[in-house]
Amino acid sequence: MKTELKLARTLHFDPNMEILTAFFIFLFGAAIGSFLNVVILRTHAGKSFDGRSECPNCKHQLAVLDLIPILSYLLLSGKCRYCKRKLSFQYPLVELLTAVSFTLVFLSQISSLLNPFFLLTFAFLLFVVSVLIVISVYDLRWGIIPDKIIIPASIAAFLYQLVFNLILVQNYKLLIINLALAFGISVFFFLIILVTRGRGMGGGDFKLSIFIGLALGWPLALVAIFLGFLTGALAAVMLILLGKKSFKQTVPFGPFLALGALLTILVGKEILELYLKSMGL
């Protein structure tokens, strides 16, 4: 396995193949983004995920041509084909965001393409990104992180840690460290909630922190939490300076934690290396 990992770092892949693969992953991400819209809206409405898609206004079942990610919205000028009412810009936005995020994750992981566990790790990262997108949109729209999403996602992340570290690579020490880190992060967030009496963040952010700890593990989960606080603080200051928010108003923190986790997936190792170098380590 060590030999394969060395090859993965030294071999140069065909640029044309990389571009073609990235293009197909973009299309795949757009399709998944369409499904994520279904998850977001039906979770909020308390509906199941099965059944045909329909217009949220006239309830007319949508045809295949109405469901092409991104393109259908553009070709129909953002309106329902049947009732002509405006559709939410959330639909193409989530599809495009998912497509771009999936592509960037692939490009960030391409150096480990020959790693025997690449497919498992890559699939899990796409799952993590999907969860982060769903949670961000949900929190921005309704100010809550639903248990129906975050609890199953955290269980899946926990099972991934067990399978990967306990069975595949048999790194028991890393498994214990990752689980301890997730517990430590959760305690940290719980204390913040107690001190601020829930005004700075809520129970949903506490659960999201556990998911991030389990999903990213040591030490990247710490980078994600730091970036989440940094981007959240910068955004809050900007909104206050622009007069959009006051000091007494709160800003949903879940999307910033999700952004920190996404940035960590993409460039977390590089950020950590720069930090360690700046500290002379």
Image (tube, rainbow, N blue to C red):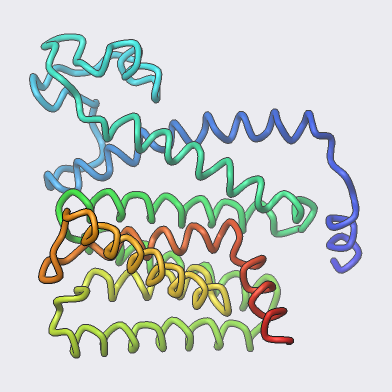
Q: Residue at x 22, y 74 (%)?
A: 201
Q: Position of residue 97 (x, y in %)?
A: 42, 40
Res. 145 in view: no
- Whether residue 187 sits left or right of residue 167 in the image: it is left
Quarter of the image with the N terminus in it: bottom right
Which of the 4 quarters of the picture holds residue 53?
top left
Q: Residue at x 15, y 43 (%)?
A: 47
Res. 262 in view: yes
- Whether residue 126 sits left or right of residue 117 in the image: it is left
Q: Residue at x 52, y 69 (%)?
A: 216
Q: Residue at x 85, y 58 (%)?
A: 9
- Whether residue 225 sits left or right of residue 249 in the image: it is right
- Whether residue 83 sits left or right of residue 148 in the image: it is left
Quarter of the image with the C terminus in it: bottom right
Relative height, residue 99 to residue 274 (above, below): above
Q: Position of residue 83 (x, y in %)?
A: 11, 11
Q: How many marks?
A: 0
Which of the 4 quarters of the picture holds residue 169?
bottom right
Relative height, residue 22 to residue 116 (above, below): above
Relative height, residue 4 to residue 58 (above, below): below
Q: Position of residue 185 (x, y in %)?
A: 40, 83
Q: Position of residue 24 (x, y in %)?
A: 60, 30
Q: Foreground residue, 259 or 244?
A: 244
Q: Foreground residue, 184 or 244?
A: 244
